[in-house]
Amino acid sequence: MAGIYIHIPYCKKACHYCNFHFSTTKYTVSEMLESIGLEAALRKDYFRETVHTIYFGGGTPSIVSPLELQLLIEKIKAIYQVDDQSEITLEVNPDDISRENLAAWKTAGFNRLSIGIQSFYEPDLKWMNRSHNAVQALRAIECAQEFGFENISIDLIYGTPLLTDELWYKNLAQVASLNIPHLSAYALTVEPKTPLDKMITKGKAAAIQPQKQAEQFDILMQWASTSNFEHYEISNFAKPGCRSKHNSNYWQGIAYLGLGPSAHSFDGNTRQWNIANNALYLQSLKNGQLNYEEEMLSRENKINEQLMISLRTNEGIDLEKLKIVFGEEEKIRVEQLAIPWIKHHHLYKNEDHLILTNTGKHFADGIAADLFLVKG
């Protein structure tokens, strides 16, 4: 089982908080998709496993012609062994959803949509500099459902300066009322060099309030527990049977190939990342060359990565798996380091699994770092 991630690095406009690699200049879109197809061919031996998930992210892949996306999917299927029941996801913006596009996306092979709603609250959307409005957000979901897309995920952001607890409750109530099967919810993060970072530095935007974000995360977890949503990863919630297969593969350490500028790949032993520059990426592929950096993962890297990604899930750290892969000493070491966190009710042990409590989820990164194997 393996996955392919395809990065489409174009957007209509720049959201104030975003630090992903993208461009608002779109004249190279067709050349980019052709180059991604070339990269797929050059990387045909990256893994031998059957591909079970394909994920188009970005950027905003929904601004690309559906026919061009379809042709790229067909190239991928011609190069790799893709399972007939594979999950094929398209990230879309609400303002790109129309009956015409929905029909074309289905024809192209997409069976899952990840819709970038971010908020159902109009002032919040304007503050984020989103390209859609609240009416479009609602109508986009309803239209996709009416057209027969059942496997739908939406993104929401909490902890913004304008989002009160009352409005956050209303956003979550909207998720429930629309019968959306999957939710990804993220605390607003101020990334360096983004427009938001510069606005806060210049006093043109309010600084983020960590306490407010923590309280809204608690609201989110409480809502999920009473709304039949499984909190299966720190930022992800799903109705039974509706987890994201593609993202779940990341958290299980399954191999994946990243295509497109800035995309990352992982085969279990190495991690690669493509150059985050559209022009240089295109030039390299024009010359029949790949342009990426690579890191060979040490035993220490592998242990720490497994601890970090597994701790984020509701299954937690599988101590028996840790023992099988890395040895009895590693299992004992992690168990001993976990004792203080268990005493403070940030972790609990369920058979051979160490799992975060709701309180512990606030400190997931710090707990993982404390369990890391550090060279001495």
Image (cartoon, rainbow, N blue to C red):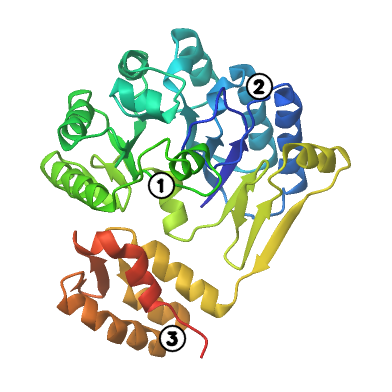
Could you tell whether 311 is left or right of 37 in the image?
Answer: left
Front in this rendered view, residue 1 or 371: 371
Q: Is residue 91 above or below residue 281?
A: above
> Which is nearer the N-term, disc 1 or disc 2?
2
Relative depth, front residue between 111 and 174: 174
In this rendering, which labeled residue sits more in front, label 1 or label 2? 1
Type of amino acid under label 2 = Glu
Q: Is residue 315 visible?
A: no
Q: Earlier in the sequence, mark 2 or mark 3?
A: 2
Q: Earlier in the sequence, mark 3 or mark 1?
A: 1
Alpha carbon distance from label 3 to label 1: 37 Å
Farthest residue in the top direction? 100
Q: x%, y% of residue 30?
A: 73, 23
| Camera-side mark, 3 or 1 | 1
Residue at which label 1 appears: 189
Q: Secondary structure at mark 1?
A: loop
> Quick one: which residue is furthest to the left in this view?
226
Tell me the residue that label 3 is attached to: 327
Callout 2: helix, strand or loop? helix
Amino acid type of disc 1? Answer: Thr
